[in-house]
Amino acid sequence: MSNIRTRNLNDQNLDELIALCPFNAIEKDAQSGLAINAGCRMCRICLKRKPDVFYLAEAAPAPRINKQEWQGLAVYVEQQNGSIHPVSLELIGKAREMAAKTGQQVFCLLACEKSAGLPEQILAYGVDKVFVYEHPELRHFRIEPFTAVFADFISRVKPSGVLVGGTSIGRSLAPRVAARFKTGLTADCTILDINASTDIDQIRPAYGGNIMAHIQTPNHRPQFATVRYKIFNAPEKTEPWGTVEFCQIDAAALKSAIEVLEIRPKEKVRSVEDAEVIVVAGKGIKKEADLKMIYELSDALGAMTAGTRPLIEQGWFDPRLQIGLSGRTVKPALIITCGVSGSVQFAAGMQGADHIIAINNDPGAAIFSLAHYAIVGDLYQVVPSLLEKIRKGGALV
Amino acid sequence: MKILVCIKQVPDSTRVDIDPETMTLKRGGVDSKINPFDLFAIETAVKLKEKHNAQVCSISMGPPQTEAAIRETYMLGVDEGILLSDRNFAGADVLATAYALSQGILSTGLPDLIICGRQTTDGDTGQVGPEIAEFLNIPHVAYVRNIVSSDEKGMVLEMDMPETIEVVRINFPFLMTVEKGIFQPRLPSFKRRLASKDRPVRRLTLADMPDSQPENYGLKGSPTQVIRIFPPASPTTHEIWKDAPEVLADKIYSKLSELKFL
């Protein structure tokens, strides 16, 4: 129940007060005049606007949990066919950062059919202890056995916080385990930090990224958070110091009502709307053969290549690869435009991209007004030079 | 076969502004609608109803005006609806929301199949479905993009994983979350609207729950607390780079590495 209460209602215009709430959570009440209904999302707007009327009732303090009993930060290491998902390494990096602040240890949970070599790989990123569950039932991800293993790990280790990659698996598994322990889960955090009381400061976007919320789990343990891939940085490898513990679990706990019939690679025909990275060729490209360097750049970035209307009309691209009002509207994480002038029609189809890098030799090109990085230069020189750098950079790793 | 669809009423637009002085949500339009992702869950249920002659029920939690969203599901082919509405349910986070819904479901009897959309457009978490399944002690399958087959005992489903399509067989009862595009949602039918105009929406309050302890619901039953909300840092980056081609290439390379695209 919302702990917002009302007072001093006598001289107030109730309809105005009701109109304060963006969620229609204030309603008339025969007894007390006004009441807060189930729509309340604790946005506190009423408290800020009318503090003389709305106030927070002091809730009877819930019994405090003993946070000393919950120590260390745990990372769920996701693996498929013997390779570790890179988001797990990024989470290890963040867990180590936070653990260093509170003097805690970093643990990892690995559940798989055969762990061969994986625990050692994990230890190389500076983890204190890897808990490994090996069982034939853990061959494919199915919710019941993986939840059982996760729950066994938590009961055994009692970590203060648990980080899970915001992958298809993580977003299915983390809420399930959090519910089993009746504890809090904050999905898709973009910022994580920890305070002295081991409470994790979790910051996440909501309303399609239009607002950010700072969330804590002050009186429940463990604190669950999921984080998407490529939000944090993977740590450098280090001389390992941690240990590995192989854990046993009752086979009966690994039973599942789900039978995996088939796992097949996804068909590669993607639509340009789904692409995370797009490289766009514009009419600064003089002839069709010159598209080769654009495709090379796309390959290096794992991107899709698309075109502007003039190039579609030349027949250089499939019309499904046209970006703009008369083509497709895209919202990728990154878009690089090469020789695109940036007509209003084109801009309308791509200005929602998170990062826009525009290469054009005309300093007055309209595309530059919406680009985050406006590169004034000849694409025939800049793109080959960039490809050369990528090739060399790749060779160094 | 009994099918239950979980829906949420969300603000009509995700365009919310924050008052820079008070750091609270600015009052936007009060228009609301069914969470768009839930339309795919409703359509999936209605398709299964047409095939298996199933009974489809929608359930939601929210203030009394959420009844409008339940009524809308009637126009889409849902047979009955349940609304959990009680002041004690207010301020619920993922856990308290999933717990209340699971209690509401238990009080009306466990269906064969529960369908949820992949996420909402306001909270954006996509975590309530799996938590409901946990509280009901039934398995769940997430990211369902296609129903390969269905019979009285269970279903064969395709899950949309990042690199692969996973095909699984699962027996009832279970919960699934469906992807956008599993079926094309139908439009509300005027005929059904007329036919359902007197159909009641069943209202459940705390007293109807098997567990009627108020501290397990709403804000009190929520382990997570919102400390504050604030506007995202606006991406105001606008840099103009003029330099020799090699230097420009170098700068682009560094930027792409920094942003983790390389």
Image: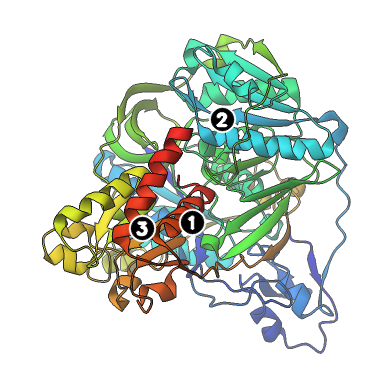
Callout 1 crowding tier (Cα within 10 Å): few <14, some 14–19, many ≥20: some
Q: Is residue B19 left or right of residue B185?
A: right
Pick whichever, B94 or A161, lies toward us.
Answer: A161
Q: Is residue B113 visible?
A: no
Provide the chain ID for the residue under circle 3.
A
Q: Residue A347, how many percent across, how many down?
A: 34, 72
Callout 3 crowding tier (Cα within 10 Å): few <14, some 14–19, many ≥20: many
Provide the chain ID for the residue under circle 1.
B
Residues at discs 3 and 2 both on one chain: no
Q: Which mark is residue B251?
A: 1
Q: Residue at position x 63%, y 76% from top?
A: B26
**Mark 2, secondary structure of its residue:** loop
In the rendered image, the vertical position of residue B13 relative to residue A157, given as above or below = below
Q: Residue B153, how many percent across, how many down?
A: 34, 26
Q: CA distance from mark 3 to mark 2?
A: 58 Å
Q: Are marks 2 and 1 in contact (CB under 8 Å)?
A: no
Pick whichever, A158 or B216, lies toward us.
Answer: A158
Q: Which amino acid type is shown beneath numbered disc 2?
A: Asn
Q: Residue A259, how many percent across, how many down?
A: 38, 21
Q: Are marks 1 and 3 in contact (CB under 8 Å)?
A: no
Pick whichever, A349 or B178, lies toward us.
Answer: A349
Q: Which mark is residue B137?
A: 2
Which residue matches tag 3?
A382
